[in-house]
């Protein structure tokens, strides 16, 4: 078994694709963005200042985050899988993720989760920091407009009212924050394979990655 790192900007389809791949390969999918979201959620619920790095690091000392095989996330034994998916938490998670000490804490948890291999981990710094030695690294991109349109359709299906122009602005803001922060900014690892999902389907992306994985596994 190998480890697979999937990085890329918000809304490129990382998690949906990682989920399908994990099923096909019977690997474990770990969505690291959900961990930053859970941290932001707990800080918000406790009225903590997201900008204050030390306060958040202190909170983490007493915080349990568990990702289950069926894709749920438990924060201190409470299932927060749905609560962390709001727009508000998306922006707060982006803010919380700029703190180097918060990243250090979560990265070490993520590295422990991948020790036994057979993991597909998606995020922003998996190929560059968390799993530098991952056997397969994918950098998944898509145009801003395509990502906004996909989020818009998802929201429609969930009966969440949204505005396409607003979604574009939010995606641009998060892209800016995620690529410009000092601590592990979103960047393609030099040995990652870039896949642009703008004009291909999820299944086509999955097939491309499976091909890359099979090539790697067969060479070994
Ligand atoms: O993938 P996502 O949208 O659920 O991630 C939420 C935020 O967390 C995102 O704005 C960037 C941050 N993040 C990160 O900095 N590093 C990761 N490995 C995963 C997410």
Image: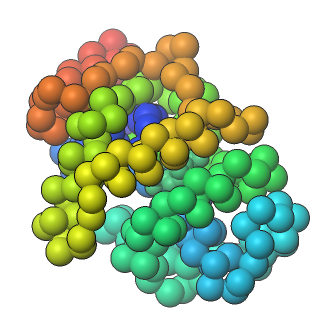
Q: Which of the image's four quarters has the N terminus?
A: top left
Q: Is residue 209 visible?
A: no
Q: Is residue 176 above or below residue 164?
A: above
- Front position in the image: 36 or 113: 36
Relative to 70, residue 32 above or below = above
Q: Residue at x 46, y 72 (%)?
A: 84
70 vs 123, nearest the viewer: 123
The percent coordinates of residue 179 (x first, y second) are 59, 33
Total numbered labels: 0
Give x and y (percent) for residue 20: 21, 48
Q: Position of residue 79 (x, y in %)?
A: 44, 83
Up-down: is 105 above or below 13? below
In the displayed structure image, the side of residue 169 where residue 219 appears, left or right: left
Residue at 71% over, 84% down = 47
- Seen at 43% across and 34% down, the residue is 8
- Residue 172 image position (x, y, % from top left): 46, 40
Q: Residue at x 76, y 51 (%)?
A: 99
Give 185 or 107, whichever is nearer the viewer. 185
Whether residue 168 appears in this view of the structure is yes
Q: Quadrant of residue 35?
A: bottom right
Drawn side of residue 22 relative to residue 100, left or right: left
Instruction: Single out the residue that lies furthest toward the right.
Output: 54
Instruction: State the image quarter where residue 146 is shown.
Output: top left
Q: Is residue 59 left or right of residue 6?
A: right
Q: Tell me the quarter of the image containing the C terminus.
A: top left
How is the rendered protein coloured?
rainbow
């Amino acid at each position: 078994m190998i480890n697979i790192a999937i990085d890329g900007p918000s809304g490129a389809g990382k998690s949906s694709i990682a989920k399908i791949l994990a099923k096909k390969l019977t690997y474990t999918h770990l969505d690291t963005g959900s961990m930053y979201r859970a941290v932001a959620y707990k800080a918000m619920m406790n009225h903590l200042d997201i900008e204050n790095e030390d306060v958040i690091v202190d909170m983490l000392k007493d915080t349990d985050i568990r990702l289950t095989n069926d894709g749920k996330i438990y924060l201190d034994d409470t299932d927060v899988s749905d609560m962390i998916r709001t727009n508000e938490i998306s922006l707060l998670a982006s803010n919380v993720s700029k703190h180097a000490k918060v990243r250090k804490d979560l990265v070490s948890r993520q590295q422990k989760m991948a020790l036994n291999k057979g993991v597909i981990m998606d995020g922003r710094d998996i190929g560059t920091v968390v799993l530098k030695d991952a056997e397969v690294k994918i950098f998944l991109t898509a145009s801003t407009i395509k990502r906004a349109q996909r989020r818009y359709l998802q929201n429609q299906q969930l009966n969440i009212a949204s505005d396409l122009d607003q979604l574009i602005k939010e995606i641009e803001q998060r892209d800016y924050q995620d690529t410009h922060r000092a601590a592990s900014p979103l960047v393609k690892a030099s040995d990652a394979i870039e896949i642009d999902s703008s004009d291909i389907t999820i299944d086509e992306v999955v097939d491309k990655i499976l091909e890359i994985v099979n090539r790697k596994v067969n060479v070994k």
